[in-house]
Amino acid sequence: MAVFCSNCGKSLGDEARFCSGCGRPIYATQPPVFVQTRLIRPREGRMVAGVCQGLANNYHWDVVWVRVITVLATIFSSGAGLIAYIVFWLVMPEEPLALPPVTTYTQTNGS
Ligand SMILES: [Zn+2]
């Protein structure tokens, strides 16, 4: 099985780590690609930063319960829930504007 440089097309040995023609690194397998996670903060349905909505979307939870648990955890842990919320806020990417809104959650009206 021949390996070809993706940059200059030079045929290389299977053991080649770098192209002998142009020096470009050769990957035995595809280089790791960014896996699109669904753990994002959606722009639709958010109340504060979309953390609860994003978690609910990703794990198919009821967003109402996620919010209730977050609030209760904050109250009964003297703020740890809030810290967790802020951490999620920081690490969860916001839903890109280019993508259609992730609104797979079921709308819960009232109560
Ligand atoms: Zn090359």
Image (cartoon, rainbow, N blue to C red):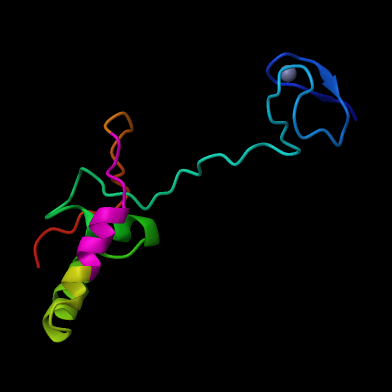
Q: Residue at x 15, y 86 (%)?
A: 76
Q: Residue at x 68, y 36 (%)?
A: 30
Number of marks present in the image shown: 0
Side of 110 where 35 appears, left or right: right
* x and y, in percent, of residue 104 in the image: 32, 48
* 85 falls in the magenta region: yes
Side of 10 where 84 appears, left or right: left
Q: Which quadrant would the C terminus be assigned to in this image?
A: bottom left
The secondary structure that dominates the magenta segment is helix
**From the viewer's perspective, is residue 68 above or below residue 4?**
below
Which image quarter has ligand 1?
top right
What is the residue that sits farthest to the top in this orientation?
8
Q: Quadrant of residue 33?
A: top right
* 94 falls in the magenta region: yes
What stretch of residues is rendered in magenta?
Answer: 84-96
Q: Quadrant of residue 6?
A: top right
* x and y, in percent, of residue 55 in the image: 31, 60
